[in-house]
Image (cartoon, helix red, strand yellow):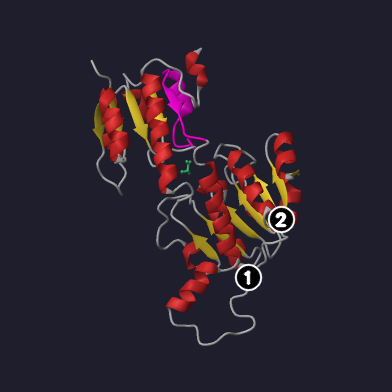
Amino acid sequence: MKARIYITRKLPDEVVRGLQEQFHVTMWEKVDIPVPYEILEKEIQHVDGLFSMLTETIDEKLLQKAKKLKVISTMAVGYNNIDIAAASKQRIMVTHTPGVLTETTADLTFALLMAAARRVIEASDYVRKGSWKTWSPMLLTGQDIYGSTLGIIGFGQIGQALARRAAGFNMKVLYYSRSRKEHAEKETGAIYTDLESLLKESDFVSVLTPLTAETKHIIDEKELALMKKTAILINTARGEVVNETALYQALQNGEILAAGLDVFQEEPISMDHPLLTLPNVVALPHIGSASVKTRLAMAHLAAQQLIDGLHGKRPENTVNPIVFE
Ligand code: DGY
């Protein structure tokens, strides 16, 4: 008998077809609304595998209903939305999709950095609103990128890919992470430093750590106060690594110059959020890995790991290998 799986969002047809060949598939068909928790709570009771997104909260309460569940395959590199300890307790494998999204996410991070530095969105709005009357010497002047200093907090695959891009702009790259990455230092020329020095010396600070209890609000009032008045903060990790209230104050009071944000504490961000009132904030709707090729690669990888897990193989990117012990 075929195993049963639930897919929490409409996926490309080719990926769904591949899964249908192996499993009995039920899928939440909506494209722009995530499956409500109460529906997932019902569906999860009957399935062996779950193909999920970063929009689902997969907590202990939900997992307790999942008596048959063996694998959760999330189509994301980040898995802070899943209670890994609770899944491990129930011997449920959790897999994610690192690697395939590295370069695409680094591209977007650099694009955000450039957009915030050179006020690209503000300038485009200026043209569209009909405000452009003449060329003027200091009109919409921004910050130089070439030759500046970039501080990267979290030096995993995406952080390292960002450092490679920075080399093309002759940037000095500092990084801070839990452990020193000497091999990556040699490859990228990045310099390991403590967090305080990174914040004081960088023209751009890019946060690229996973969200954990240790990294929650790693950028808070104190850290923002250490940054240069001309510094620009870029967050393409998770909203909660930055204290948004403190960030708003720092931007409003001129403690830092600008921010480029692809992620927010609440997603989607509410339209009356104070950050959206500031012209020096570039806000994007969590599109770090959103290229056609990469999203397809993520979907295929997530599907393959679900197939492997349900066929008794060890999936390549298991977050909690403890379940195999
Ligand atoms: C991830 O994979 O965690 C990103 O935030 C979305 O691609």
* Mark number, residue 312: none
User: Mark 1: few, some, or many residues within 10 Å (few <14, many ≥20)?
Assistant: some
Q: Quadrant of the N terminus?
A: top left
Where residue 16 sits in the image (x, y, percent)? 29, 34
Question: Which type of secondary structure does the marked residue at label 1 adopt?
Answer: loop
Q: Nearer the viewer, residue 108 or 89?
A: 108
* Residue at left offset 66%, top offset 57%: 204
Above or below residue 111? Residue 181 is above
Which circle's residue, 2 or 1, is located before the other in the chain? Answer: 1
* Residue at left offset 37%, top offset 35%: 52
Question: Which type of secondary structure does the marked residue at label 2 adopt?
Answer: loop
User: Mark 2: few, some, or many residues within 10 Å (few <14, many ≥20)?
Assistant: many
Residue kind at label 2, given as amino acid type: Met
Residue kind at label 1, given as amino acid type: Gly
Above or below residue 129? Residue 54 is above
For disc 2, does the CB lie below 8 Å from ligand 1? Answer: no
Q: Is residue 16 left or right of residue 198?
A: left
* Mark number, residue 142: 1
Q: Which residue is mark 2?
A: 171
- Span shown in magenta: 78-98
